[in-house]
Amino acid sequence: MSETANLLFEIGSEELPPKTLLKLSQSLLDSTVAGLQAAGLSFAGANAYATPRRLALTISDLQLKQADAVVEKRGPAVKAAYAADGSPTKAAEGFAKSCGTTVDQLTTLKTDKGEWLAFNQAVKGAQTADLLPDILRKSIQQLPIAKRMRWGAGETEFARPVHWVVLLLGERVIETEILGQKTAAQTHGHRFHAPQAISVNSPDDYLQTLYEQGKVIVDFERRKKIIDEAAQKTADQVGGIAHIENDLLEEITAINEWPVPVVGNFDQRFLALPVEVLITTMQSNQKYFPVKNAQGDLLPHFITFSNIESSRPVSIQAGNERVILPRLADAEFFWQQDRKLKLEERVSHLGDIVFQKTLGTLLEKTQRVAALSKLIADPLKVDVALAERAATLAKTDLMTEMVGEFASLQGIMGRYYALADGEPEAVAIAQEEQYFPKQSGSPIPSSQVGQVLALAEKIDTLCGIFSAGLIPTGDKDPYALRRATLGILRIVIEGRLQLDIVELVDASLAQFNHDFDQQKTRSLLLDFINDRFKGYCLDHGYRADEFDAVISVKPSQPLDFMQRLEAVKVFRAMPEAESLAAANKRIINILKKSQEPLADEVGALLETQELDLLAAAKLSADDIQPLVEAKQYQQALARLAQLRSSVDAFFDHVMVMCDDLTLRQSRLALLALLSNQFLKIADISKLQQ
């Protein structure tokens, strides 16, 4: 047998959960690779495969045996190993016996902490075939299976009942038992086209054997590409373009081993429904790809995939058309029924729905959000009446039949119903945009009223949940507060809104009348927001010490914060930055250690260097004040960088903490004058080398 061989491992089961199939497949591969590496086994490559009825992996050129090794065992200290007459003690003899040798065969290990008896033992490497079963069992145990199940009378647990296991190393079957099944070289093909057992001669033949004899395309990515291309080709046959979203594409790939495209049609009258309703019905309920024309308008067709080559494809088409008809008819009924009642007539019904037991009903939340919306809209010069109206209607579509059936359409249906009710377009658009950004990287609201409503809604939720004591911990965040906070920051920063987050948090907290510690909650909230803010800044290429420099001066407007942050980033690239950062750190340390109250003004000074620094500091103070007021922070820091030579000369020649109390206080006041100029922008002493 050669020194390496290819490995094949396959678990055959009942249909696996399609939405987690890829995650299970990758986890199995990652854990197995980690196990092989931990065992010191080298290999050339690794691949994962997944179909509805199997998880599989192959490892190429896997080392067949661990390398031999020499293991050094450390025994007792030499001083405890021998008696005064030089004879070995019981400790030495016991250690030698445990190593299977005699005391005279032991060596001495010298270290900084002393000398020790030692024994170098040659350990032969284990055979890979002997190691694999335990490595694979451990990998299976580590799979992220939400709920494991048992079957039959056994105690074995897995995502679904297991029917076969293949374990081949080269052409050799590694005989063991995994998941209640004895390993073999036999797999199974398509449930209907090739249900019989199929022999696999070697890992190299696996993909081709299942394709040719089993009617199974094992490679997930290959199957996904086939489905994508087949959907587009089929859509082209009806004069359209397949609307393909990756999540659905992967789900369809996960439920088909031998995908065959089928085109279906539906009555054109349903095209009068909102396009999102039709797409949601087709995608979520039926796993169909919608079809659009070149202009992006929906066509009365859909594409599905059958996991079988039927002799009567027309029957499969007819069956799918029969299934989708009542779905679309239901959606049509919901649309017609919902429009019989205007959104404003649904506002009072929000009082019947509890938002959160401590925070009250959706009606109470609506009233809080409306008040916040007015507060946010006013300084932004956004129409306050429109903002308040949008907030008043914001949650009313939750009371509709359509959103009750399709929860993902909340906001979207609010926009449609608001337009149908004759509400201003700005109010209607805001109904949908209140939920923006929906996920990381997705768009923020594009309209002003939408931005106001989205901010008010998220701030109320964030402050309310914190006030109720339901602060996210670890990976638990049931109210998606991390996402809401990042959304707040993105809207303010990317929308270039001059808003004070601290003021908005205070205003929001003041609206809650249940019993809670407002100051403690405020502190926890601002820390939580700053943590998300730091992550946002790091993701955008800023450094942690740059963020720390700005957060130290506590700017409360995120947009202003970002302008300061960019100024610090530019400043640190200047040749003067390192020296001035060190000087500021020194200044702050000196001022902290001083036990004396600082003088309001700089008094008499003696040395030329301190007189020069005072003059330079007064000039820079006059120069940077208008720059700071205009938020021209880069220019302000560039002006302060000109102080470097004066600062360096001061510290080279002047003793700040001198014995003369009056002179010492003057010098401390000078340092405070200098430090305060930088602190108008950021604490540059936080910058690391």
Image: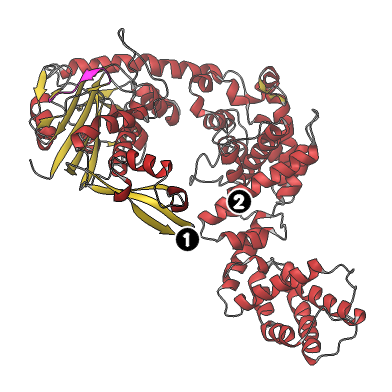
Check whether the beta carbons of the residues at disc 2 and disc 1 lie within 8 A of each other: no
The picture places residue 81, in percent across and down from the top left corner, at 43, 48
Side of 128 where 590 appears, left or right: right
**Whether residue 55 is situated above or below residue 534 in the rendered picture:** above
Indicate left or right for 25 with 271 as reference.
Answer: left
Give the numbered dot on residue 163.
none
Residue 592 higher or lower than 388, as above or below: below
Q: Quadrant of the C terminus?
A: bottom right
Q: Label 1 amino acid?
A: Asp
x, y (%) of residue 648? 69, 84
Q: Residues within 10 Å of mark 2 (few under 14, many from 20)?
A: many
Say which quarter of the image contains residue 670. Answer: bottom right
Report the predominant secondary structure element of the magenta stretch: loop
Q: Which residue carries the number 1 mark?
A: 112
Q: Residue at x 70, y 31 (%)?
A: 469
| Viewer-side residue, 222 vs 414 | 222
- Span highlighted in magenta in the image: 179-185
Q: Which residue carries the number 2 mark?
A: 533
* CA distance for labels 2 and 1: 48 Å
Along the viewing direction, whichever of 573 and 588 lies nearer the viewer: 588
Q: Earlier in the sequence, mark 2 or mark 1?
A: 1
Name the outermost residue toward the front: 85
Residue 119: % across, % down: 32, 49
- Quarter of the picture containing the N terminus is top left
Name which residue type carries label 2. Phe
